[in-house]
Amino acid sequence: MTAAPTADTAPHQDFEVRPFDAPVGAEIVGLDIGRPINEADFRRIHRAHLDHHVLVFRDQQITPDQHIAFSRRFGPLEIHVLHQFHLEGHPEILIVSNIKKADGEPLGLGDAGAYWHSDISYKPHPSLGSLLHAQELPSEGGDTLFADQHLAWEGLSPGMQQRILPLKAEHSYLAKYEELRAKNPWRPKLSQAQIDKVAPAVQPVVRTHPETGRKALFVSEHFTTRIVGLPQEESDALLAELFAHSVKPEYVYRHLWAPHDLVFWDNRSLMHLAAGTPDELRRKLYRTTIEGDLPF
Ligand code: SIN
């Protein structure tokens, strides 16, 4: 029997990187994630990810194991605190879905991404990047928006840049949890063990990308609760100004999903938002989340 190709022996895949006519993002055309990817091809994908921050791989008919294996090439994977929505047998996959099971229980996290955020910024080591794979799409709605936080930083006045550069902010998974639960009572009540796993973390308000050295704004309406050391009123006013600035249309790419899209974004460069799906239409995606470094 011939051995299956590995990262060293896999044949080259002839793919193209086509930047979008948008502030961020590129489509990777001609790559099959389900086939082994050799080191040289992997390095090109990695470079494209650093350059464009969000990569779209169309029509990837991959299994959860292949999704996980590709994600792992970039680093160890996070296990999401909401174990209720792990894909059975694959705790590395979080189900993002508004579908209800036959017993009326939610299949997945239906309101994931309801506010702008960067994944896992509430942990000391926030995520490097996330990969969302379309399983079932609504006939309308369900788009995902991505905002470039390098451009957001560069778009601030020199005075504001100087003011916020030394600041730190608290991020908390619980910041909007009860508000979301009031709107969506299917959201599970967190156990004490779950709460203990998501103690708030303090992050720089401006972070430096560990691979490109570019600065990015790093606060979000979903998870950032306060600027450390500022009176609450001043902190609220500054955060409101930064939140509004960080998602200006000129920093945003809007992804319209197509069947079997795999979308891979850089949480160190971007924030994202789920635009929402009409309740009566079904939407299901699988998400892996790669662990990242300590921000600086
Ligand atoms: C997320 O925030 O991970 C989900 C985004 C989406 O469902 O579009």
Image (tube, rainbow, N blue to C red):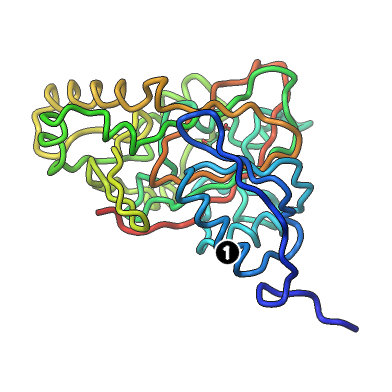
> Is disc 1 surrounded by few (<14), some (14 to 19) or many (20+) residues within 10 Å?
some
Determine which quarter of the picture holds residue 162.
Answer: top left
Name the spot of residue 178 as percent of width and height, x first. Answer: 41, 28
Residue plotted at (9% across, 33% down): 230
- Where's residue 52, x and y in %? 48, 43
Looking at the rendering, the quadrant in which ligand 1 lies is top right
Residue under the point 50% across and 63% down: 75
Looking at the rendering, in which quadrant would you find the N terminus?
bottom right
37 vs 154: above or below: below
Residue farthest to the right, as pictured: 1
Q: Residue at x 57, y 49 (%)?
A: 83
Q: Which residue in the structure is indicated by mark 1?
A: 73
Q: Amino acid at mark 1?
A: Arg
| Left/right of residue 151 with respect to residue 38 in the rendered view | left
Q: Nearer the viewer, residue 87 or 64?
A: 64
Left or right, 33 with reference to 132? right
Instruction: Using the image as rendered, state which of residue 2 and residue 229 is in the foreground.
Output: 2
